[in-house]
Amino acid sequence: MSIEEIQTAWGVDEWYGQMLVDCEGEKIGKLRDVYVDSESGEPRFASVRGGFVNRRLTFVPLRGIQAGPEDLRLIVTKAEIASLPEIDMYDDELSQEDAEVLYCHFGQVNGQIGTAGDRCLIRR
């Protein structure tokens, strides 16, 4: 199911507060914010409420996400999420550098997703 299909089925506004689970069914936490590509407006990442300890924000990729009746299932593991370098949030926008860290860490470079390039991620 593509991001567009999920948006139609649930709508991004309905994602807030939904439980996120990894590809193995492990709970990650509740979706806090959605971050969209500054050029296309397409949802790319989300931050997690109640995520990992000792982090300001935990980010997860929305690529390949599957909407279930009670949660949103990611295509990455909890270990992949936990190994993400820490990203501090100071306003509603992630810098180009921080966006690139997210894209690269979760293997979203070139091809389907593209790189962050000169784009930022904006909290929606």
Image (spheres, rainbow, N blue to C red):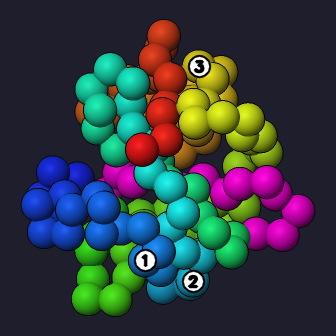
Pointer 2: residues within 10 angstroms few (<14), some, or many (20+)? some
Sequence-earlier tag: 2 or 3 = 2
Amino acid at pointer 3: Gln
Q: Are marks 3 and 1 in contact (CB under 8 Å)?
A: no
In depth, the one of 23 and 27 nearer the eye is 27
Mark 2 and mark 3: Cα distance apart in space: 29 Å
Mark 3 and mark 1: Cα distance apart in space: 27 Å
Mark 3 lies on a secondary structure that is: helix
In depth, the one of 121 and 24 nearer the eye is 121
Judge whether 22 appears above or below 116 on screen.
Answer: below
Mark 1 lies on a secondary structure that is: loop
Residue 63 placed where, x, y %? 35, 51
Image point (20%, 69%), residue name? 10
Task: Tell whether 92 sits left or right of 113.
Answer: right
What quarter of the picture does the N terminus occupy? Answer: bottom left
- Residue to which mark 1 is pinned: 18
Sequence-earlier tag: 3 or 1 = 1
**Where is residue 67, by image quadrant?**
bottom left
Task: Tell whether 68 sits left or right of 83.
Answer: left
In front: label 1 or label 2: 1
Pointer 3: residues within 10 angstroms few (<14), some, or many (20+)? some
- Residue to which mark 2 is pinned: 27
Residue 114 placed where, x, y %? 36, 25
Image point (15%, 51%), residue name? 4
Residue 78 placed where, x, y %? 62, 70
Instruction: Give the magenta range.
Output: 52-64
- Residue to which mark 3 is pinned: 96
What quarter of the picture does the C terminus occupy? Answer: top left
